[in-house]
Image (tube, rainbow, N blue to C red):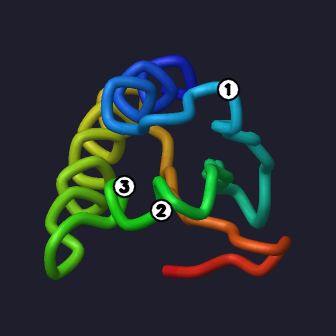
Amino acid sequence: MKETLIFILQSLVDVPTNLSVTETQQEGKIILSIKADPSDIGKIIGKSGRIIRAIRDLIKIIAVKHNQYVDVVITENDEPQS
C-alpha cells in the first residue's frame, strides 16, 4: 500500500525528491504519513479536499482486500493533519 501511495503522489507533485511516506502501526491499524514540499501540499489535498479524499478511498479499498485498516494523513512540521 505504501508503494502504491508513493506512486500516486509522485505523479501529482512538482518536487518528488521532497516527498516521503512513513508507515507506522498504531492500535491495530496502519498509518501512512505523507510529507511533501510545502508548495505541493495544495496539489495533494486538491480543491475542497477531493484529491486526498480519493487517495484515501483508494488506499482503504486496497487495505480491505488485505483485511487491514489504513489511515492516510498529511504531516507538516511533524504535526498530522486530517
Q: Amino acid at mark 3?
A: Ile
Q: Outermost residue toward the right?
A: 78
Residue 2 in the image, given as x and y percentages of width and height: 57, 28
Which label sits on residue 41?
2
Classify mark 1: helix, strand or loop.
Answer: helix
Q: Is residue 4 left or right of residue 62?
A: right
1 or 2: tag closer to the N-terminus: 1
Residue underneath mark 3: 44
Circle 1/circle 2 CB separation < 8 Å: no
Which label sits on residue 17?
1
Q: Amino acid at mark 2?
A: Ile
Identity of the residue drawn at 64% across and 37% down: 19
Q: Is residue 16 left or right of residue 61?
A: right
3 or 1: tag closer to the N-terminus: 1
Q: Residues within 10 Å of mark 2 (few under 14, many from 20)?
A: some
Which label sits on residue 47?
none
The mark tally for this picture is 3
Please say if 3 is above or below 63. above
Residue 6 in the image, given as x and y percentages of width and height: 51, 26
Circle 2/circle 3 CB separation < 8 Å: yes
Identity of the residue drawn at 77% across and 80% down: 79
